[in-house]
Image: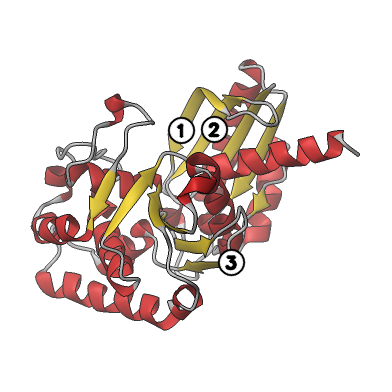
Amino acid sequence: MRLGVLDVGSNTVHLLIVDAQPGAPPLPAFSHKTELRLAEHLDEVGALTYAGTRMLATSVRQALEIAEREGCETVVSFATSAIRDATNAEDVLRSIAATAGVHLTVLSGEQEARLTFLAVRRWFGWSSRRLLVLDIGGGSLELAIGDNEDPDAALSLPLGAGRLTREWLTSDPPPAEDVAALSRHVRSVIEREADVIRRHREPDRVVGTSKTFRQLARICGAAPSAAGPYARRTMTLDSLRAWLPSLAAMTAAERAVLPGVSPTRAPQLLAGAVVAQAAMEVLDVHELELCPWALREGVILRHLDTMRSEAFE
């Protein structure tokens, strides 16, 4: 079957279309992205503006039209922190429903962490044993640890790369004292909550997912995307530490020419690096491996699991 997953995130509205069936890996068939940067359309009280809401509703409608044109039998639609944190989230959801005819499911931070963990578990399999998964998004940092497909513990923190860039790094490049202040803030937030993860047995494998980790790993020497999804990619804490001062000294335009870094994500890469370093240090992670699957794949896999379960009822 052809299945679409529509992800309304902090940076993009992303439609991923896959050919999928229960018990088999989903095979990407088509991808469509619209860069919206929803958090830039929040007003002083944290509400998504009228213009931002209209842009979002239009983008969702257009994505659904593309999904229909591409032959999707089903589209699973969800939103993450950008909508979850908006003070007028219910009004935004009603506007999307009226314009696009779809009711978005708003995932909690913990649901994000658990679904991403599922995707990583399926990608690496049971031989990877106990997993610790780290995921830096635009609005939040997700952490999860466990032996099974559902983690023993899952945690979401308001430490997304886009959020922190807007709140802490307002100059380009930012002054050293702003970067230092951000580092202290990030570390304190992670330290305050890390026992949720640390009280569990140490992982056998640590994995980073999503675009921020992929871009950081690439500039630290990991294989390019042209090497394909099955190339083993890792990033060490030492290599990240070595790069962070250079990233802090660069403008966004200078970061955008680094290998693997997209111009749209370059402004928030420094904040992402600060979060990655702090998380690895607090959790005593010296090396992590990259996984090409993340939240969208987790949503697809959970949907397929539900279909398979219903087929046996």
User: What type is the residue that disc 3 sits on?
Assistant: Asp
Read off the residue under disc 3: 152
User: What type is the residue that disc 1 sits on?
Assistant: Lys
State whether residue 22 appears in this view: yes
Mark 1 → mark 3, Cα distance in angstroms: 33 Å
User: What type is the residue that disc 2 sits on?
Assistant: Leu
Mark 2 → mark 1, Cα distance in angstroms: 6 Å
Query: Measured from the top left, where is residue 44 in percent x and y?
Result: 44, 69
Q: Secondary structure at mark 2?
A: strand
First-in-chain label (1 vs 3) = 1
Q: Quadrant of residue 56?
A: top right
> Which marked residue is nearer to the observer: mark 2 or mark 3?
3
Residue reaching furthest front? 127
Give the quarter of the figure containing the C terminus.
top right
Read off the residue under disc 1: 33
Query: Measured from the top left, where is residue 13 in percent x and y?
Result: 50, 40
Residue shown at 17% from the left, 42% from the top: 221
First-in-chain label (2 vs 3) = 2
Read off the residue under disc 2: 15
Relative vertical location of residue 302 with respect to residue 83 in this rendering, above or below: above
Q: Nearer the viewer, residue 280 or 105?
A: 280
State whether residue 51 appears in this view: no
Mark 2 → mark 3, Cα distance in angstroms: 30 Å
Residue shown at 48% from the left, 28% from the top: 32
Relative vertical location of residue 20 with respect to residue 45 in this rendering, above or below: above
Residue shown at 68% from the left, 32% from the top: 75
